Image (cartoon, grey):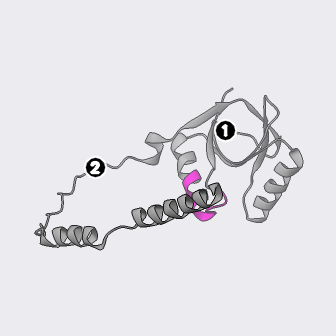
């Protein structure tokens, strides 16, 4: 007797839950009709605002650290770093690859022991910024994370 009562209750709950979740067509029709009845208002585009453009050098951020050349030429005050490695073998591999591309990269090491592959080094801050943008554009997306180093003597 109890099993028939539970079975009847289960069937009743299932039927009630399935019919209660079903959305009524009239509710959708009412919302649709209301949306169609609204007038369409054309908006004029907002006037263009003139924003002064800044040179990349004005906003460029340089990471300042002391580095010493390990393999390559002398370093100047500002440099463009295309790779940072804990392993010297990986750093040398990237340096050699960029030499085949016609660059004269410098392999340097900071005080913490990290190796930096420097693609170009300059005395002028603005020249380093321009070169970084050129590298990022030419080798996108490979060197999109190229960054600027200021030598801390």
Say whether residue 140 is magenta.
yes
Q: Which residue is mark 2?
A: 51
Is residue 151 depicted above or below 119 in this figure?
above
Residue 74 in the figure: left or right of residue 80: right
The spot of residue 136 in percent (x, y) is: 59, 57
Q: Quadrant of residue 140?
A: bottom right
The spot of residue 94 in percent (x, y) is: 79, 55
Q: Which residues, given as a range, are shown in magenta?
A: 132-143
Is residue 147 depicted above or below 29 in this figure?
above
Quadrant that contains the C terminus:
top right
Residue at 57%, 58% in the rendered image: 134
* Inter-mark Cα distance, 2 to 1: 34 Å
Q: Which residue is mark 1?
A: 76
Front-lying residue, 16 or 137? 16
The spot of residue 41 in percent (x, y) is: 12, 66
Q: Is the residue marked by circle 1 packed among few (<14), some (14-19), or many (20+) residues within 10 Å?
A: few
Who comes first in sequence, dot 2 or dot 1?
2
Which of label 2 and label 1 is nearer to you?
A: 2
Q: Is the residue marked by circle 2 packed among few (<14), some (14-19), or many (20+) residues within 10 Å?
A: few
Question: Farthest residue in the front direction?
Answer: 1
Identify the mark at residue 36; answer none if there is no mark.
none
Quadrant that contains the N terminus:
bottom right
Front-lying residue, 60 or 105? 60
Could you say whether the residue bearing mark 2 is in a helix, strand or loop?
loop
The spot of residue 88 in percent (x, y) is: 87, 45
Q: Quadrant of residue 65?
A: top right
Residue 90 in the figure: left or right of residue 57: right
């Amino acid at each position: 007797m109890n099993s028939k009562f539970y079975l009847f209750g289960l069937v009743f709950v299932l039927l009630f839950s399935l019919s209660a979740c079903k959305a009524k067509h009239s509710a959708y029709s009412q919302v649709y009709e209301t949306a169609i009845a609204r007038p369409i208002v054309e908006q004029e585009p907002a006037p263009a605002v003139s924003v002064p453009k800044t040179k990349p050098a004005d906003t460029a951020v340089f990471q300042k650290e002391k580095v010493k050349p390990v393999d390559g030429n002398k370093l100047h005050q500002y440099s463009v770093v295309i790779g940072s490695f804990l392993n010297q073998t990986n750093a040398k591999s990237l340096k050699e690859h960029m030499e085949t591309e016609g660059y004269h990269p410098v392999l340097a090491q900071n005080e913490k022991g990290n190796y930096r592959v420097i693609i170009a080094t300059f005395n002028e801050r603005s020249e380093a910024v321009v070169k970084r943008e050129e590298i990022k554009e030419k080798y996108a997306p490979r060197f999109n994370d190229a960054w600027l180093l200021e030598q801390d003597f």
